């Protein structure tokens, strides 16, 4: 190995040939996906030795005065003017909400000010989407889609000056309602397989013969499609007559088409699990458009997949993580209050350990998810397009959001099941699978994208080695490969040694940032990062192209990477808040959860390693003393659960609920919870007095006599105290009550879909 010429001939050249053989085949669309976006903190985690000072030095996310005013004003007002139940009954937002959205520029959060938009930061965009999601999933979906992957985003990055100047001000004012059509009946997760076509041909346009595209397509699941005036369309372009050049298959392309164009069929609706946001199919038959309708004009013909991949990472970093986090915050709010208000066996539900387990999962997840959401929004504001991290956030935050809704439903019991105006959970439960499915199905994200893309994109050497594999100048490629290979081997050996040394406890003496509480977690992540880098390298070496088909191994490696990112986000947030003691339970829960899940994935990976003998040897290196982190303890769960039951204003509770819409109207079903909590808290001393009187025998209600009346008659309570108790119990009962309907009101109307 010390003699370069001999090493290249007898070691590097055979390794290069082997590498070329085992390299997985990669389609053009896969390559575009790999090349899209940027590598950020995920690259540090892949290195096996993350630089924590780099992470901690990133500036804290904060809102401008204008952004804060928008959240406190128009966003709060929009939340207040909608009811999730009424939206579901009307299957649409109320007219005043649509008007408010357009008037205040909710469709223009990402459009720069020079075009009439808000020009908000990614963090502000995320805050708005999250607050709306804590009120109504339909409301959040309606607002977030135009601000995610769609015409505005694509025009900003790739549109011609003429297209930007024409469309962006109209989109900002709400004169145009956009949608983007990618998914079709035959191309879901495999969008590159779309059969939709655009044939280059000559046709009549505004009285003249021009070269354009004759389009035929069929799309479905398109949000805002039924009300859209401007359709963004993905299709495959072909030039069979070679009117533009020698190539026939030009590739995926994107166009903007007014929906009133002849041949466009749009307006019908899907019903996604009863959700009311506008979503439906559209199609086109022999629709002729000029080349000027292509986003970016003729120069961007055939570059649509690259355009989509580069824009998708930003949208997936903001919209869906905000919705998932919103679900966690909302369920923290309502479940924490409900378990204080609702009593069984004469004690609040929150006193039961089984309930505390669910409360801890809800509140702990809310804080952990919020940390991850804030960090990735910060990355986007720093100019990053974190493609791998966006896949991590999309998967884990929508899954954890669904978990929170499930726990909330379990705790609420019948209250969450009986639909009606007083049920604030049912529609969230119904709609949870929607966010699991859109913008890359979660099964696909976990099994193929996170590690499959991350292993190539974030690894210090693999992408460079793959680039050499396709080079025609073989001899020069071998020389360059030799240099990379030596670095790669050194990288692998260092990570293997680091894994063993750190897991034997030597890492306890290394210098890490943080306070006494967080330093142990920094060291734990150093151990996991080294182990992950070692196992990722070995898995790729042993399996080569087969790793692409061994999805469960890939998924577990992705789980390790994902949970290291979640843990990093919690550490960063705790640092940015200056290590507050009040948040220690939430921070520790988040770290134990993320580290425990990461170790579980490592454990399962080693148990199912392709080479069982090697897997056993690796277990000795990775877990010489067994697993160190197995998830939050019962004691930690109880501490987090207790936080959700605290009074408004508590710093730990406010950290969990920050950014959540919290109605104060006692007639609102969510506001009624706060009202009941306040009333019961105000009557706590009187209730305690009554309880002791009953236990001592001072109060003995006669048959059918109400306890409060008996206490009043016995002189234990004063009239004012009795009234306070009655008002508190009435507020409690309002929360507990569920809806019922006249039978006739539920009879279906002939010809109408319910």
Image (cartoon, rainbow, N blue to C red):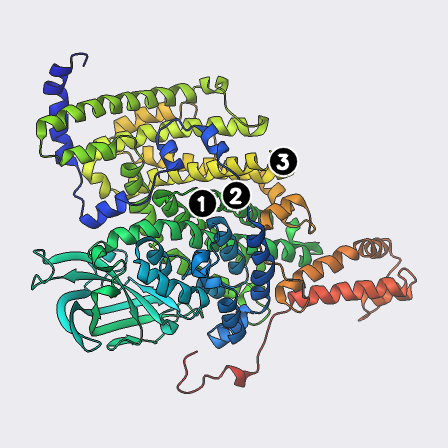
SS for tag 3?
A: loop
Q: How many C-alpha atoms fall within 10 Å of the one at disc 2: few (<14), some, or many (≥20)? A: some
Q: Which residue is mark 1?
A: 381
- The answer to which of 523 and 203 lies nearer the viewer is 203
Q: Please state the horizontal and vertical placement of residue 687, each as a whole percent of the image.
A: 80, 56
Circle 3 crowding by C-alpha within 10 Å: few under 14, some 14–19, many from 20: few
How far, Cα to Cα, is label 3 from label 2? 18 Å
Mark 2, residue position: 61
- Which residue sits at x=24%, y=30%? 611
Q: Nearer the viewer, residue 252 or 661?
A: 252
Q: Is residue 599 left or right of residue 534?
A: right
Left or right of 693? Residue 301 is left
Q: Position of residue 209 (x, y in %)?
A: 15, 73
Res 34 label: none
- Of the residues tagged 3 and 2, which is closer to the observer? 2
In the image, residue 465 above or below residue 259: above
Residue 225, quarter of picture: bottom left
Q: What residue is shown with label 3?
A: 580
Residue 416, visible in the rendered structure: yes
Q: Residue at x 14, y 17 (%)?
A: 7
* Residue at left offset 22%, top offset 70%: 289
Marks 1/2 in contact by CB < 8 Å: the verdict is yes
Point 23% across, 77% down: residue:
263
Q: Could you tell me which quadrant the C terminus lies in?
A: bottom left
Check disc 2 and report its element: helix, strand or loop.
Answer: loop
Q: For residue 627, say whether it is visible.
A: no
Q: Position of residue 538 (x, y in %)?
A: 26, 29
Report, in whole angstroms, how far the alpha carbon at label 1 lies from the one at label 2: 9 Å
């Amino acid at each position: 190995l010390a003699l370069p010429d001999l090493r290249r001939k007898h070691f590097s050249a055979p390794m290069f040939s082997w590498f070329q053989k085992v390299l997985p085949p990669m389609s053009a669309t896969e390559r575009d996906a790999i090349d899209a976006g940027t590598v950020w903190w995920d690259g540090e985690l892949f290195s096996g030795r993350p630089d924590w000072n780099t992470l901690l030095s990133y500036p804290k996310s904060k809102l401008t005065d204008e952004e804060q005013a928008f959240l406190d004003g128009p966003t709060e007002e929009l939340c207040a003017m909608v009811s999730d139940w009424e939206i579901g009954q009307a299957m649409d937002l109320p007219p005043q909400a649509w008007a408010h959205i357009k008037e205040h520029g909710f469709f223009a959060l990402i459009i720069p000010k020079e075009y009439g938009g808000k020009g908000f930061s990614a963090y502000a965009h995320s805050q708005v989407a999250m607050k709306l999601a804590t009120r109504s999933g339909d409301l959040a979906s309606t607002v977030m889609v135009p601000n995610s992957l769609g015409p505005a985003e694509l025009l900003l990055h790739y549109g011609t000056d003429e297209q930007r100047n024409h469309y962006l001000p109209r989109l900002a004012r709400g004169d145009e309602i956009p949608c983007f059509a990618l998914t079709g009946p035959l191309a879901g997760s495999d969008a590159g397989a779309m059969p939709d076509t655009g044939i280059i041909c000559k046709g009549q346009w505004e009285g003249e013969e021009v070269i354009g595209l004759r389009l035929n397509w069929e799309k479905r699941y398109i949000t805002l499609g039924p009300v859209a005036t401007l359709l963004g369309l993905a299709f495959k372009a072909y030039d069979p007559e070679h009117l533009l050049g020698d190539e026939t298959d030009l590739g995926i392309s994107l166009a903007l088409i007014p929906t009133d164009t002849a041949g466009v069929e749009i307006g019908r609706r899907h019903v996604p699990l009863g959700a009311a946001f506008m979503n439906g199919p559209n199609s086109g038959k022999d629709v002729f458009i000029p080349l000027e309708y292509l986003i970016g004009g003729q120069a961007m013909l055939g570059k649509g997949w690259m355009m989509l991949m580069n824009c998708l990472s930003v949208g997936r970093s903001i919209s869906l993580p905000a919705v998932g986090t919103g679900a966690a915050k909302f369920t923290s709010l309502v479940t924490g209050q409900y378990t204080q208000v609702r009593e069984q066996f004469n004690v609040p539900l929150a006193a039961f350990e089984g309930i505390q387990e669910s409360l801890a999962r809800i509140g702990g997840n809310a804080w952990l998810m919020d940390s991850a959401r804030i960090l990735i929004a910060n990355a986007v504001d720093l100019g990053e397009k974190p493609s791998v991290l966006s896949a991590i956030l999309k998967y884990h935050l929508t899954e954890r959001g669904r978990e929170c809704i499930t726990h909330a439903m379990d705790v609420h019991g019948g209250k969450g099941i009986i639909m009606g105006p007083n049920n604030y959970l049912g529609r969230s439960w119904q709609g949870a699978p929607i966010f699991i499915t859109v913008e890359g199905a979660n099964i696909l994200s976990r099994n193929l994208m996170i590690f499959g893309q991350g292993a190539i994109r974030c690894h210090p050497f693999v992408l460079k080695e793959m680039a050499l594999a396709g080079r025609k100048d073989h001899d020069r490629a071998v020389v360059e490969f030799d240099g990379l290979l030596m670095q790669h081997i050194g990288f692998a050996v260092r990570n293997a040694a680091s894994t063993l040394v750190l897991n034997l406890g030597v890492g306890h003496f290394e210098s890490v940032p943080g306070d006494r509480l967080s330093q142990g977690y920094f060291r734990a992540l150093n151990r996991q990062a080294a182990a992950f880098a070692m196992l990722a390298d070995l898995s790729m070496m042993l399996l080569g192209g087969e790793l692409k088909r061994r999805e469960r191994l890939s998924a577990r490696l992705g789980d390790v990477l994902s949970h290291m990112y979640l843990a990093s986000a919690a550490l960063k947030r705790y640092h940015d808040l200056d290590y507050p003691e009040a948040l220690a339970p939430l921070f520790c829960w988040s770290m134990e959860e993320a580290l425990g899940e990461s170790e579980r994935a490592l454990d399962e990976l080693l148990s199912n390693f392709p080479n069982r003998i090697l897997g056993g040897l690796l277990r000795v290196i990775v877990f010489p003393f067994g697993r160190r982190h197995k998830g939050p303890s019962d004691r930690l769960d109880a501490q987090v659960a207790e936080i959700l039951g605290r009074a408004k204003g508590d710093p730990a509770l406010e950290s969990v609920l920050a950014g959540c819409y919290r109605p104060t109207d006692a007639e609102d079903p969510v506001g009624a919870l706060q009202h009941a909590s306040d009333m019961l808290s105000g009557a706590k001393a009187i209730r305690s007095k009554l309880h002791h009187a009953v236990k001592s025998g001072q109060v003995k209600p006669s048959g059918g006599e109400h306890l409060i009346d008996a206490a009043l008659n016995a002189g234990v309570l004063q009239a004012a105290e009795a009234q306070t108790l009655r008002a508190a119990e009435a507020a409690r009962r309002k929360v507990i009550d569920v809806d019922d309907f006249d039978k006739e009101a539920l009879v279906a109307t002939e010809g109408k879909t319910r």
